[in-house]
Amino acid sequence: MLRMVKGLACSLMLVATPALAEEWHEFAKTGETIGFVDTDTLRTDTTPVTFDMFVGYMYGQGKDGEVYYVIYRMSADCSSGTLTVLSLRAFDIDRKPITNASRDTIENPLAERTFASDVHDLACVAKGRSSGKTNDPYRASDDYFGGF
């Protein structure tokens, strides 16, 4: 009986703990931003294409400058060249969730050679293939910016 209770408790802990993807593929770097796409969530067989994207920022973003990491749920329309933020989860420098974080939905034609166009190309052209990957985008972001 005790073994069954312990097993149930462990199972509930796994369900209650949010997990990041195993492989986040790097798609873009700027001096102040690094981005990864979760290829496990990349759905190229749908229109529009949907996927999760992690972005790490060197400097705090948002009204209070407290957002350093964001996981976006994205949608890319490959034929019209639009990119839409469906939802987001923001985190502070200590990786703690920031409640009530929001961002206006982006749904504009993408300019060439920008961070947004790199996201679009990864989803629509490369279909998630990239040279770099990590299972911990928080650490990869911190390493890229010289650690915190």
Image (tube, helix red, strand yellow):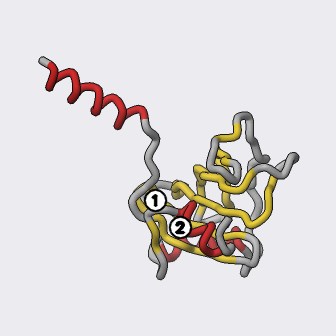
Left or right relative to 112: residue 64 = right
Q: Residue at x 46, y 59 (%)?
A: 42
Q: Secondary structure at mark 1?
A: strand
Q: Residue at x 67, y 47 (%)?
A: 90
Q: Could you say where residue 138 lies in the image, as x and y percent from the top left?
A: 57, 60
Q: Amino acid at mark 1?
A: Leu
Q: Could you say where residue 66 lies in the image, as x and y percent from the top left?
A: 78, 49
Residue 93: mark: none
Q: Amino acid at mark 2?
A: Ala
Q: Could you say where residue 21 lies in the image, as x and y percent from the top left?
A: 43, 55
Picture quadrant where residue 48 is located: bottom right
- Which residue occupies the foreground of this view, 104 or 88? 88
Q: Residue at x 63, y 43 (%)?
A: 96
Query: Vertically, is 3 above or below 135?
Result: above
The residue under label 1 is 42
Residue 123: mark: 2
Left or right relative to 62: residue 39 = left
Mark 1: few, some, or many residues within 10 Å (few <14, many ≥20)?
Answer: many
Q: Secondary structure at mark 2?
A: helix
Q: Are marks 2 and 1 in contact (CB under 8 Å)?
A: yes
Q: CA distance from mark 2 to mark 1?
A: 7 Å
Q: How many marks?
A: 2
Quarter the N terminus occupies: top left
Quarter the C terminus occupies: bottom right
Dot 2 or dot 1, earlier in sequence: 1
Q: Could you say where residue 103 lies in the image, as x and y percent from the top left?
A: 77, 47
- Which residue occupies the foreground of this view, 2 or 79? 2
Picture quadrant where residue 59 is located: bottom right
